[in-house]
Structures are given as C-alpha cells and as structure tokens.
Image: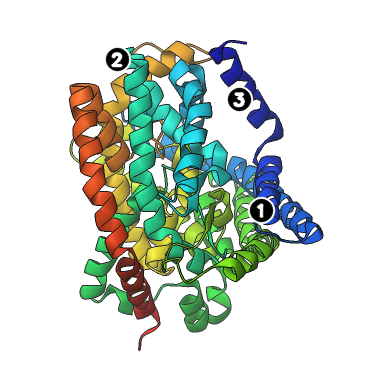
Amino acid sequence: MNLDALMQSLSNVFNTFGSAVFVPFIIVIIALFLRVPGKKAAMAGINAGIGLTGFGWLINSYIPIIVPAVNNFVQTTGIDLPVVDIGWQATSVIAYATRAGMMFLGFGLLFQVALFLLKVTNIFMPGDLWNNYSYMFWGSLVFAVSKNMWLAMAVMFLLVLYNLIFIEMYSKRWSTYYGYTNCVPPALHIAPSTPFAIGGNWVLNKLGANKIRWSPADLQERLGFLGEPITLGLILGFLLGFLGHLGDIGTLAAWGNILTIALSTAAVMAIFPRVANIFASAFMPITEAARRQTTKDVKEGDDLYIGINDATGYGEPATLITGILLIPIMLALGVILPGNKTLLLVDLIAIPFIIQPIIAVTNGNIFKSTILSAIWFSAGLYICTVTAPIFTEVYAKFAAEPLQEGVMVTAGMIANKPIAGGLIVMPSLNLGWVAVGVLAALWVPLYFLWKKNKVKIHAFMEEQAALEAAE
C-alpha cells in the first residue's frame, strides 16, 4: 500500500466513525491510562458520545431553519458583493482533495501527539481531530499555488505551533466559563482570536464597558421573564425571521416560518444546557484522576486539557445571542467597509462556533462580545477579499459543480483569519521558505515568552473577567 492509499484509508476511517465515536474512544483510552476504573472509563466515553450526538442533532436541525431567512434578507435588501461566502464546507472540499491535505491527516496527527507527549503543550489536540481540516485547508492552498509539498507541510506545522500558544492562552478561561472542566476547543478557526480578545476586553473595561452588563444572568435579573435565555431566544428568533421575510411579510407562510424560527431558537436555548451537562460529566473521572496523580513537579497551569469539538459552546446563551445579533451587523459592515468585496452568507450561522474565545474572555458580556467580534470579523473580511482569487481558483478544481464564469467564492468563517491567513499563509505564498524560516525563528522566543508569563496572563484574564461582577 503506497502513502496516498494509506492516507486515504485513514481519512475513510475518520469519516466513517465520526467524532461521536472517535472522541469517546480517545476519552476511554486516556481514562484507562490515568487508571480510572474500567466501568467509569466506559461511562465517560458513552456520555461523551451521547453529548456529541445531542449537539449534532440540535445544531444540524437548527441551522437549516435559519439559513433560508438569512438568504431571503440578502435578496430582499439587494446586497451585492462580488465575493460570495459559500460556507465552511468549501474549505473541507479543498482540504481533503489535495495530497498536502491528506498527508497532514496522518503526519499532522502524529505531530500533535508528539507535541503533547514531549510536553511542549499540555493540550491533547487530537481530541478534536475533525477540525484539523482548518490546517489542511490553508496547507492545500499553499500546495495548489506553489506545487511544493514540503512548503505546504511546513506551513501547516507552523500553524499548529502558533495555534498551540493561542489554545493554551484561552484554555483556562474557556473551561471556566463554559463549564467543561479541563477541556478546550483547539480548532485553528477559533483559538487565534484570543490575543485580540484579551487586549480588546482590557481596552473596553478601561472605557467602562464592563458596567454595561449584558450577560445572560444580568439580563435575566433586570428584565425578569423577558431576560430569560429561552425568552430572549424566542424574541431574537422572531426578529431574525421577520427580517428574513421583509419581502413577503403579508403572507401566512411567512408568519408560519417566522414563528418556527422563533420557537426553534428558544428550543436551542432550553435544550442545549441539558445536553451540555451530559457531555461535561464525561470528563469528571479524567479530571479527578489527573489531579490525584499530579505531583509537586507539575507547574501551575500545566495540568492536562483535552481538545473537544467547538459544538460544545455553540448553544450557550451569550454565545448564541451574540451570534444572532452579529448576523445583520456583519451584513451591514460588509456593505459599508471601504475596499471590502466579501458578502458573508452561508457561514453567518456559524458565528457562534468562532466567537467562543471572545465570549469566554468577556465572561459572557454580550455588549462587549458583539463589539469585539464585529471588529475581528471586519478584519477577516479583508483577508477573505485578498485570498478570494486563490480560493476560487483552487475550489474550482475540486468542486462537484463548475462555478459560474466571473464568480469568486470564499468561506466566511474559515478563510477570514487575520493571523493564520494574513500573517502566516500569505507571506509563505509570497516569500516561500524565507517567510517560513522567519516565522519559525520568531515562534521560538514567542513560545518561551508565553511559557514564562502563562500563569500571569491566565490570572490577568480571570481578573478582567471578574470585573463583570464588580459593583
């Protein structure tokens, strides 16, 4: 069996079993390694599988209800930009279609395991294996343009190295806020917004924005029944449905869909926390076992964290509310930002996946999270605009159906990465090995600087988060 066939077989295994099977398997192995009794280890794996299956059912049922409303709103308002967001699925097509992407599927996994075993990081990143397509996507772009396999692999490995700093940076805050002990989503399309979130949150706190308390708990206390997450979901879903039917608001069918969207959003708010509790229980035996085996030689902040899927935070009230608020905001910003050519569309409903570091850093302050997310995504629009010609050229080679002549496409929530796309991939495309060498050399001092200040930065983040509760 040659290498390409081996990588394809590995891909088939991952795609066949899916995260709801593979992640529980990893959890059971880790639990047994930490000497958790067999029965507890098995139940931990089963609960993880139940939780991931529940998240999948909720999100996969909710998204198709919302997307048509967003599309209707865009058509009704006549928003027209030349680069169209066709969703994260487009990046997965590119990621799995090139030899570079398939090579990373195996060697990238080994690299991530090695980083953990060699204690370069305390995050077991392969716990969220499927979101490795973010690395594979960027590497596939480099390979498709440069035709250089080694350059593409080097860029993907660089992305892993830089991303592990960002993952470690927000791991404690995410775990604390979302309530999954010693867990964190390690995906490349999520973690890199963390430094911006930390700095932006500090600036907003200095400006007094922490006094504008828009967390779910604060809203519930101030607004009573109207501030409860379920009611807020009902109201926001209603408004989103209303905007989606401006063109046919007088029809019975429109009002039926508006109320369906409203109730569906409320349902996610009600059901998601219950599924989250089941999933969180899967990690309790592992956490307890890890803490029992912790010695005095283990430095503070280096305790074990397991990478988990970003679906675990999607339906958290502040996350989903902020995500829904950002849909019309980002459509408006796409129109008014000078030089932007990207229309966010399909991936608008994926916003709650991407903003989790910002939500965690602001401790669920919807007001601050909306501001910071809008700024971060606005910068990302320009990355999408710049990379759209390359993205379109590569996607057109592998798309199941040919694109219309003159159409440019992107993936709004995956390709809009100022750090991954703007500071690592684009320089590597333009300067080749020179950029890779400079970025590799720069990573070394940044890594040791991070390790030296890790505990202090985590403490600073907790202090800033605590300001949300200050009088």
For label 3, count other residues whose C-alpha is less than 10 Å away and answer few (under 14), some (14-19) or many (20+).
Answer: some
Q: Which amino acid does label 2 sit on?
A: Ser
For label 1, count other residues whose C-alpha is less than 10 Å away and answer few (under 14), some (14-19) or many (20+).
Answer: few
Mark 3 → mark 1, Cα distance in angstroms: 26 Å
Disc on the earlier residue, 3 or 1: 3
Marks 3, 1: nearer the viewer: 1
Q: Can residue 408 be seen here?
A: no
Callout 1 touching callout 2 (CB < 8 Å): no
* Percent position of residue 454, x then y: 33, 63
Please give the name of the residue rendered at 47% of the width and 72% of the height, measured from the top-left corner.
296
Determine which quarter of the picture holds residue 173: bottom left
* Percent position of residue 368, x then y: 33, 65
Please give the label number shown on residue 146: 2
Determine which quarter of the picture holds residue 42: bottom right
Mark 1 → mark 2, Cα distance in angstroms: 43 Å
Q: Quadrant of the C terminus?
A: bottom left
